[in-house]
Image (spheres, rainbow, N blue to C red):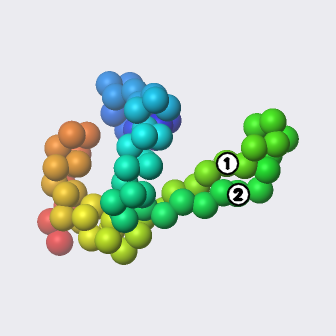
Amino acid sequence: MARVEEQTKGQVKLRQGTIYPLLREMENEGFLDSYEGEPMPERGGRPRRYYRLTAEGAKKASADRQIVAGIFGLELAHV
């Protein structure tokens, strides 16, 4: 969430109520895998959840990169 805010110079601010349902939906669609880390005292003993792209998620991200770049106002290098 902080990275998106930083990359968009504060123009896009994602909130937990938006991002976590989206992450769960992407996981249900097979684009992400998630796993729990070790319990953390600063989180009241709760573990942090980590997400990573699946092969299908990477394929989808690659196909949609122009759309995503447009959302964030980024120029894509032509390879």
Residue at image x 16%, y 49%?
A: 67
Is tag 1's residue or tag 2's residue first in the polypeptide sequence?
2
Above or below residue 43? Residue 23 is below
Label 2 CA crowd tier, 10 Å (few <14, some 14–19, many 20+): few
| Residue named by callout 1 | 48
Above or below residue 61? Residue 1 is above
Real-space CA distance between mark 1 and mark 2, rounded to the nearest whole angstrom: 5 Å
- Closest to the observer, 13 or 25: 25
Residue 42 appears in the figure: no
Callout 1–callout 2 Cβ contact below 8 Å: yes
**Is residue 1 found left or right of 44 in the rendered image?**
left
Residue 67 appears in the figure: yes
What type is the residue that disc 1 sits on? Answer: Arg
Residue at image x 43%, y 48%?
A: 23
What type is the residue that disc 2 sits on? Answer: Gly
Quarter occupied by the C terminus: bottom left
Where residue 48 appears, x then y in whole percent? 67, 48
Outermost residue to the front: 28
- Closest to the observer, 32 or 73: 32
Residue at image x 16%, y 54%?
A: 66
Where residue 64 appears, x then y in whole percent? 19, 58
- Which mark, by number, is residue 22? none
Q: Secondary structure at mark 1?
A: strand
Q: Secondary structure at mark 2?
A: strand
Where residue 55 appears, x then y in whole percent? 36, 74
**Residue 13 is drawn in which quadrant?**
top left
| Residue named by callout 2 | 37
Label 1 CA crowd tier, 10 Å (few <14, some 14–19, many 20+): few
Above or below residue 50? Residue 71 is above
**Residue 46 is drawn in which quadrant?**
top right
Where residue 2 appears, x then y in whole percent? 49, 35
- Closest to the observer, 16 or 24: 24
